[in-house]
Image (cartoon, grey):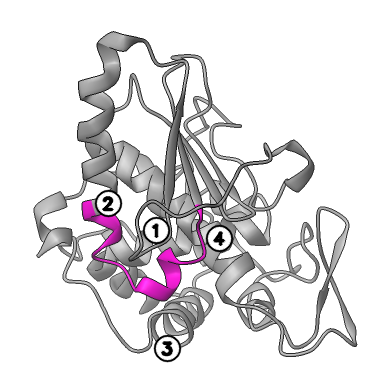
Amino acid sequence: MSNAEPSIPQANEPTQIHPATASASLPSLPTKAKNPEYSLRFSNRNMGEEKRFLNSIKKNQIETALKKLPSEHVQSVKNIILDYDPLAHRGLGGSELIILRAVDMGTEEMLAVLIHELGHNVDSGYLTPKEEKVKSAFEDWGVPLYETDSSLDFYSISWTSDEKRKQTAINTDFVSGYAMSDCFEDFAESYAYYVLHNKDFKRLAASSEALYAKYHFMKYEVFGGAEFDTADGIVKEKQRPWDVTVLHYDFSEFLS
């Protein structure tokens, strides 16, 4: 494993993507299904009448993207809100909810943020503990995580608790600077990178024991052995972006 510390760009908007399960800050929403396949309910905020057609397009783009992902992952989300306030954060995910800013963000970036936020819901709602008896050293907003929670196998690659990295962890053990924020962002960033930049992730995994373990976890524990034919595998092994959702990718590759 390399000991070199890569240069990671600073965030332009450091709080633009939020942690997975900030339940107290999430609105209470009805969960009556409008899409029977995925039990998704769409709604919007701050949308004027002139945005109605745009809202329909964005909803279609989101549904198209989600249909390319495992249905059991998508079922961890019940509500999606499109926020048309240009000052809103780009995304928020957790507690069966995703909120996306629907303006001043291109389709490619919006869908990357969608997949990142879906990763939070997969982490907290799909990978669940078999029993809740023995508490671990990890907590999610004060809520204890239990030893049988399979997400702990991912967290423990680079973390000793939800916010404390292992002393041996270095920058190249993470797919992005934002992934170093806490174990939950590490999971969500790795999830999005696996989906949209799979060949790049695989290339980096060959140079880092920690990234190899994270790739292996995503492949076998999260995606059941499936991989994506996305990106080209051309990466700079000593450098990382701030967050993976702003990296260019070919959306048609993902859809194919």
Secondary structure, mark 2, is helix
Residue 74 belongs to magenta span: yes
The mark lying in front, picked from 1 and 2, is 2
Instruction: Choose top left, top right, bottom left or bottom right for residue 35.
Output: bottom left
> Badge 3: few (under 14), some or many (20 or more) residues near its Cα, within 10 Å?
few
Q: Amino acid at mark 4?
A: Asn
Does residue 244 appear left or right of residue 160 in this picture?
left
Task: Find residue 220 and name its label.
Answer: 3
Task: Find residue 63 and name its label.
Answer: 2
- Where's residue 34, x and y in %? 38, 51
User: For the point 65% across and 49% down, which residue is it?
Assistant: 181
- Where's residue 5, x and y in %? 54, 55
The mark lying in front, picked from 2 and 3, is 2
Image quarter (top left, top right, bottom left or bottom right) of the C terminus: bottom left
In this view, the residue in front, 20 or 214, is 20
Of the numbered discs 1 and 2, the one sitting upstream in the chain is 2
State which region is magenta: 64-78
The residues bearing labels 1 and 2 have C-alpha atoms spaced at a distance of 17 Å
Instruction: Choose top left, top right, bottom left or bottom right for residue 142.
Output: bottom right
Task: Find residue 121 and name its label.
Answer: 4
